[in-house]
Image (spheres, helix red, strand yellow):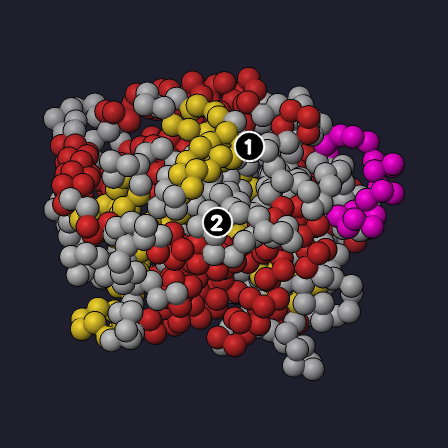
């Protein structure tokens, strides 16, 4: 039996949903909730317009087919499933691919300054894993433009009054209340196991406060900082996902971490050079002579090895990211044919990404944003010199496990409360923090799309869930929230006080550097079980040493040192999920590559890795889950829905490899091996 009012609690307070995260996934979820007349508290670690979505560069996929190439949402579905090595559930992918053209046109109407053709149509570029021009873009700053457009829409809801069932405005109540510079600490779980709010900390005053909510949506992004240096912002520690996981949420496919093939090597972080550079004609090469000492611009064409074009002539420089990264790693690490450095006197782990053959005016119109980044941080003019790049940790295909409900057409049933629900009723996840859309490897420009489509699916799902609640979270005993707040406060005080008198206390930042160095070295492009065993042993050591950490700051306001200790503890938890999952999956699939197990093993591993946290910190793997939602019992397994696109051997050596039409021909020619192309 549903509550009497969908707007007010029994005590007369306005019922709200909490969305944590102000990036594209969070903002779209907020918009869809507001359209469903569900008021929202929006909590963000940073100012919304500084969310990590702003860093996305290349574009957003949609099969609009303006260039008449024969592209379609069906082909988009097939190539996404194929690119993800068939580990993604296909109904959510189908829903995303079908909705993509409408999403891009909606963004256009919102005012996103997409690039256009001479005829005034939306322009589309090519990205990896496809032969079609499918990626709409706004120069090389697409993520920022999309984020700003959605931020404007949410600001409108911040000024809109909440109205009751009769359309009467409620004084002082706005549809969106925004809390920036607040850090998510934990979900609030009631006695029935339902999520009824969260606890967060104001990073200015360090005040800890509970937020009651009929549901909580985590849209908190990825966990790249677990690897120390990555292309991600320093805020992307995965702390919220780790907290939810430790409270009982399932974490899925954690071992699948995408390494982007082109980033600027740096001592502090690795700055992304978007796939759009290759989409607009950029070429990856190294000198044929490993002892070549001339600058890249001085090496003649005939003395260059365009390695991706040689290895994968069908797709060339636009093979999927996992394949490109492995090819570059093979060239630099195993063959020692990276670019020679006159400073170190040896071949470095770098290759050239060359755009110098393209017209400068053309490049400034399409790629100025990323080329400016290269010039600023490398100190070299990329219009006249090939850029030096190397692969870098970029994205997490894994994340919190979320459910979905399939409709009769094989897509998502819109409005089902199961869409994007975790196994904790009332706790939802959307965006990079969930595992849903990319399988074992994400195709470029599907990330912005999955964030937006995820929000469009999650918002109605949460609205349905809250309408079917017997009572609001606001009608629960106050002790439910006070206890959670006290636990969070006690944990923060522990961090502030622990080891303050110890002379040999550990430094959290140094421990993080050790964690990052270990994960970056042994749990990225190539994985070996003996090394992964050492990683797990190192994590055991760090788990003990983190207990001896002393906060570098004890100030009552803006205490970044204490906050980082909490994030480090949570990063160690996720690192174990990632490393253990990598060790246990003895196959090569997508971004997960084991030279000792080069073949994809569908018989044993065509399934979702489902990790549950145990009290002593161990990872427990399950094959099925049971939970209750909206009055119904739900049973799910780790089986992957591959009913729309049949799994087949993955290879990009011939053009059209990802299309169903070419599949039968390719499968008779390609060996059943992941080898260099899986």
Relative height, residue 633 to residue 457 (above, below):
above
| Image quadrant containing the C terminus | top right
Q: Which residue is mark 2?
A: 419
- Camera-nearest residue between 586 and 287: 586
Where are the magenta residues, as a range? 657-676
Residue 530: x percent and y percent? 55, 17
Q: Mark 1 falls on what kind of element?
A: loop
Q: Which residue is mark 1?
A: 638
Instruction: Please give the name of the residue rendered at 43% of the width and 68% of the height, measured from the top-left corner.
Output: 150
Dot 1, how many residues are within 10 Å of its Cα: few (below 14), some (14-19), or many (20+)?
some
Residue 321: x percent and y percent? 63, 45
Q: Are marks 1 and 2 in contact (CB under 8 Å)?
A: no
Query: Could one spot residue 248 in this view of the protein?
Result: yes
Q: Earlier in the sequence, mark 1 or mark 2?
A: 2
> In the shown orientation, is residue 632 left or right of residue 676?
left
Residue 554: x percent and y percent? 14, 40
- Camera-nearest residue between 444 and 503: 444
> In the shown orientation, is residue 55 left or right of residue 118?
left
Residue 612: x percent and y percent? 42, 28
Instruction: Please give the name of the residue rendered at 60% of the width and 43% of the height, measured from the top-left corner.
Output: 89
Which quarter of the figure has residue 161? bottom left
């Amino acid at each position: 039996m549903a509550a009497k009012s969908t707007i007010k609690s029994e005590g007369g307070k306005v019922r709200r949903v909490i969305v944590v995260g102000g990036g594209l996934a969070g903002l779209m979820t907020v918009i869809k909730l507001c359209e469903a007349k569900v008021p929202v508290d929006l909590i963000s670690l940073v100012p919304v317009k500084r969310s990590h979505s702003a860093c996305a560069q290349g574009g957003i996929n949609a099969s609009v087919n303006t260039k008449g190439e024969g592209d379609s949402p069906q082909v988009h579905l097939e190539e996404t499933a194929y690119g993800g090595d068939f580990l993604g559930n296909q109904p959510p992918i189908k829903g995303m691919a079908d909705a993509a053209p409408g999403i891009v046109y909606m963004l256009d109407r919102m005012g996103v300054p997409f690039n256009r053709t001479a005829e005034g149509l939306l322009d589309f570029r090519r990205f990896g894993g496809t032969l079609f021009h499918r990626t709409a873009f706004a120069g090389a700053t697409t993520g920022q433009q999309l984020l700003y457009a959605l931020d404007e829409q949410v600001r409108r809801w911040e000024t809109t009054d909440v109205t009751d069932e009769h359309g009467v405005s409620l004084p002082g109540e706005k549809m969106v209340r925004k809390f920036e510079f607040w850090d998510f600490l934990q979900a609030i779980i009631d006695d029935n196991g339902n999520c009824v709010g969260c606890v967060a900390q104001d990073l200015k005053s360090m005040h800890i406060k509970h937020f009651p909510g009929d549901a909580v949506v985590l849209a908190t992004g990825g966990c790249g900082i677990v690897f120390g240096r990555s292309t991600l912002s320093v805020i992307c520690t995965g702390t919220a996902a780790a907290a939810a996981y430790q409270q009982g949420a399932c974490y899925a496919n954690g071992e699948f971490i995408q390494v982007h093939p082109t980033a600027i090597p740096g001592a502090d972080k690795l700055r992304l050079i978007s796939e759009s550079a290759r989409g607009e004609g950029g070429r990856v090469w190294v000198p044929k002579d490993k002892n070549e000492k001339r600058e890249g611009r001085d090496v003649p064409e005939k003395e260059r090895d365009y390695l991706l074009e040689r290895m994968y002539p069908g797709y060339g420089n636009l093979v999927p990211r996992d394949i490109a990264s492995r090819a570059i790693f093979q060239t630099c690490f195993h063959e020692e044919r990276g670019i020679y450095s006159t400073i170190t006197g040896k071949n470095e782990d770098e290759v050239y990404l060359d755009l110098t053959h393209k017209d400068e005016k053309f490049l400034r119109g399409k790629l100025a944003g990323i080329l400016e980044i290269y010039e600023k941080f490398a100190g070299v003019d990329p219009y006249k010199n090939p850029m030096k790049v190397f692969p870098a940790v970029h994205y997490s295909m894994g994340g919190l496990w979320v459910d979905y409900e399939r409709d009769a057409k094989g897509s998502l049933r819109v409005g089902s409360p199961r869409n994007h629900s975790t196994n904790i009723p009332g706790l939802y996840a959307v965006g990079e923090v969930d595992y849903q859309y990319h399988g074992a490897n994400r195709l470029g420009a599907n990330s912005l799309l999955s964030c937006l489509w995820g929000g469009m699916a999650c918002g109605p799902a949460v609205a349905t869930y809250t309408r079917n609640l017997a009572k609001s979270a606001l009608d629960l005993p106050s002790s439910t929230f006070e206890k959670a707040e006290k636990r969070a406060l006690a944990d923060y005080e522990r961090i502030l006080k622990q080891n303050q008198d110890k002379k040999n206390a550990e430094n959290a930042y140094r421990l993080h550097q050790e964690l990052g160095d270990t994960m970056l070295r042994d749990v990225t492009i190539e994985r070996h079980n003996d090394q992964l065993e050492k990683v797990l042993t190192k994590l055991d050591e760090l788990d003990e040493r983190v207990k001896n950490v002393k906060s570098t700051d004890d100030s009552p306001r803006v205490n970044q040192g204490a906050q980082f200790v909490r994030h480090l503890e949570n990063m160690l938890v996720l690192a174990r999920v990632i490393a253990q999952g990598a060790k246990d999956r003895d196959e090569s699939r997508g971004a997960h590559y084991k030279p000792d197990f080069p073949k994809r093993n569908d018989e044993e591993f065509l399934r979702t890795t489902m990790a549950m946290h145990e009290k002593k910190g161990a990872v427990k793997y399950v094959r099925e889950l049971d939970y209750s939602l909206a009055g119904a019992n739900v049973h799910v397994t780790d089986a992957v829905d591959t009913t729309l696109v049949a799994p087949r051997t993955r290879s990009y050596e011939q053009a059209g490899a990802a299309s169903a039409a070419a599949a039968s021909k390719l499968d008779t020619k390609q060996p059943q091996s992941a080898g260099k192309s899986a």
